[in-house]
Amino acid sequence: GAVVSQHPSRVICKSGTSVKIECRSLDFQATTMFWYRQFPKQSLMLMATSNEGSKATYEQGVEKDKFLINHASLTLSTLTVTSAHPEDSSFYICSARVQDSGNTIYFGEGSWLTVV
Amino acid sequence: ELKVEQNPLFLSMQEGKNYTIYCNYSTTSDRLYWYRQDPGKSLESLFVLLSNGAVKQEGRLMASLDTKARLSTLHITAAVHDLSATYFCAVDKQGGSEKLVFGKGTKLTVNP
């Protein structure tokens, strides 16, 4: 079964509104999680590192004020897309590593965001 | 800056045939991952390769890593239709950072 779970799996929002995506680690604690985005038929791009109890670190070119990340507990990270625009429509996926998994990095089911 | 290149990007093959997908990367790293993605779905972990010469096999798929050549291969043996998917290799950005840089993916279609 899934070790990293995301919610919602699909969301449609209007331009200018904000939408929150949750990423949960199941049955393990994740002090660090990662957020990626994937445009249709393209590869995954790392957006940011979510750090439990501290600020997220963002990759170059990712607007931290637009993509708010909160990692308030050891099992939950949230990504909020603020003032969404159609160009933010994408597949957002989080990842985490189970400490005793043999270094496997697991990905959540992903969240499809459509901004209309 | 770490760059990861996969080839081919598209691969159409017949059932029963063998083929290899290549993954080259530009800077030193000793952690390489292979994932499978079905359309509209997230990533399924296939292999984690952690050292030079590492070879792992699962069913019809076998992955290897040559850190000196900065090359990993994913070999498909006697392909079946169920293997149709997009395969990504990903390299750890800074050994053990868990930040992954992905290749563009190889879309594999296995025809009956």
Image: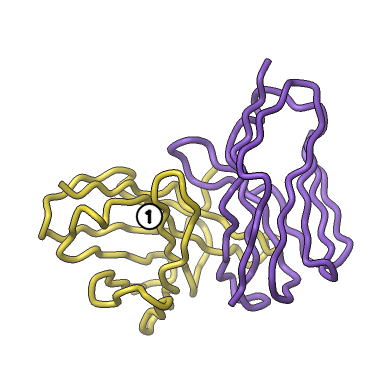
Quadrant the N terminus of chain A occupies? top right
- In the picture, measured across the screen, residue A84 lies left or right of residue B98, that is left
Residue to which mark 1 is pinned: A92
Q: Is residue B105 left or right of residue A78?
A: right
Chain bearing mark 1 = A
Residue B58 in sight: no
Query: Looking at the image, which residue is at 66% across and 25% down?
Result: B110
How many numbered markers are drawn? 1
Residue A88 pos. (x, y %): 26, 57
Shade representing chain B: purple
User: Where B80 sits versus A102, above or below?
Assistant: above
Q: Residue furthest right?
A: B53
Q: Amino acid at mark 1?
A: Tyr
Image point 73% across, 22% down: which residue?
B14
Q: Is residue B90 left or right of residue A22?
A: right
Q: Quadrant of residue A101?
A: bottom right
Nearer the observer, B16 or B5: B5
Instruction: Name the colour scheme.
Output: by chain
The residue under the point 63% across, 67% down is A99
- Name the colour assigned to chain A in the rendering: yellow
The percent coordinates of residue A87 (x first, y second) are 25, 55
Residue A2 lies, in percent from the top left, at 51, 46
* Residue at point 74%, 76% (across, down): B28
